[in-house]
Amino acid sequence: MSHSHHHQGHGHSHGLGGDAAIGWAVVVNLGLTAVQIIGGIAADSTALIADGIHNLSDAMALVLAFGARRLARRAATPDWSFGWGRVEVVAAFVNYLALIAVSVWLMAEAVGRLGEPPQVAGGLVMLLAGFALIVDLGTAALVWRLAKESVNIRAAFLHNLADAGVSVAVILGGALIWAFGWNLADPLLTLAISVVILWHVGTEIGPVFRTLMLAAPPGSDPAGVMTALKSVPGVRDAHHLHLWQIDEKRNAASVHLVVEGEDYFAITRRAKEMLAEQFQIDHATIEIEPPEACADMREHEH
């Protein structure tokens, strides 16, 4: 009975200017990664290498975000009736899983150095971390506007902000090593960086996972939706309610309504208007059942 079949408009603004911004951000982060890893090996600093690998994950996140952004522009087809907007959610989830793997590896490396911290070139560490801080802030500025529109781009944007904070910590560690010879600061900072990354992932991955698992949108009220549906004039009962997100911008619902009267179209229209106005559910599939059909079905279930 539902006729809301407008799947092609995602509410995303995918412009060529945005693609250029992401492209430059990728190039800059790959260059920074090479400088930091080479410098970290030269300075024998796991904290600097950790920051460099985190930047590499950011560059890969941006590459993935760029590809997902382009795929999301594809129009819906009979085989892909919801279009490709959901691919950005998948890309964000993959990015977060990669960050978890990187963080665990860095923690293992740092623990191995706690017993015998190596001599670290603190001055070189400060120099390269300062350069990284400038690049991280510049990259975040490039994708800041796009981050408002997409969970996919926002994941990459937040990575860069986290990197900026990490770079500040590495500068501090380099200063402690340079001024006081406290080489233990390097593995301790590496552990701290890993914890920050994991905390960041933990705060962001939940809504992405919920979307992939077709859970109700964060902050939604299934019980309230059911109560509101039962209060629609002409509706006697409601059951089999499902709420989920098609992608970051589109909420959806399917439900069975038991109705009295013959004007099924008017009842369906009222229910859809209510869902859109009160719960921001613009895609609703509603199955209408007369009271006797519902009673027969429940007898079969028992």
Image (cartoon, rainbow, N blue to C red):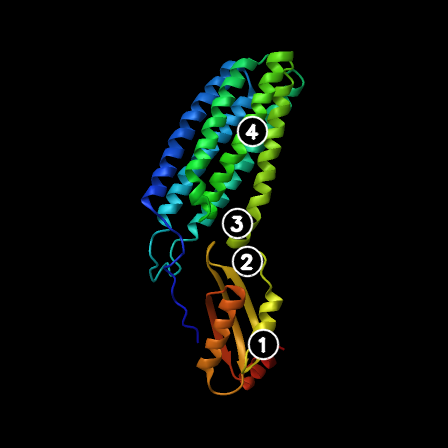
In space, the residues marked 3 and 1 are separated at their CA atoms by 31 Å
What residue appears at the point 42 percent right and 44 percent down from the top-left corner?
A: 146
The image shows residue 206 at horizontal and vertical percentages of 57, 48
Is tag 3's residue or tag 1's residue first in the polypeptide sequence? 3
Depth check: give the residue in front, 96 or 136.
Answer: 136
Q: Residues within 10 Å of mark 2 (few under 14, many from 20)?
A: some
In space, the residues marked 4 and 3 are separated at their CA atoms by 24 Å
What residue appears at the point 51 percent right and 15 percent down from the top-left corner?
A: 124
The secondary element bearing badge 3 is classed as: helix
Vertical arrangement, residue 96 with respect to residue 242, above or below: above
What amino acid type is highlighted by mark number 2?
Pro
Is tag 1's residue or tag 4's residue first in the polypeptide sequence? 4
Q: Is residue 118 visible?
A: no
Quadrant of the snapshot with the N terminus: bottom left
Frontmost of labels 4 and 3 is: 4
What amino acid type is highlighted by mark number 3?
Val
| Proximity of marks 2 and 3: CB atoms separated by less than 8 Å | no
Q: Pointer 3: what residue?
A: 208
The image shows residue 185 at horizontal and vertical percentages of 64, 20
Quarter of the rendering containing residue 196: top right
Is tag 4's residue or tag 3's residue first in the polypeptide sequence? 4
Q: Pointer 2: what residue?
A: 217
In the picture, the disc for residue 166 is 4
What amino acid type is highlighted by mark number 1?
Lys
In space, the residues marked 1 and 4 are separated at their CA atoms by 52 Å
Quarter of the rendering containing residue 258: bottom right
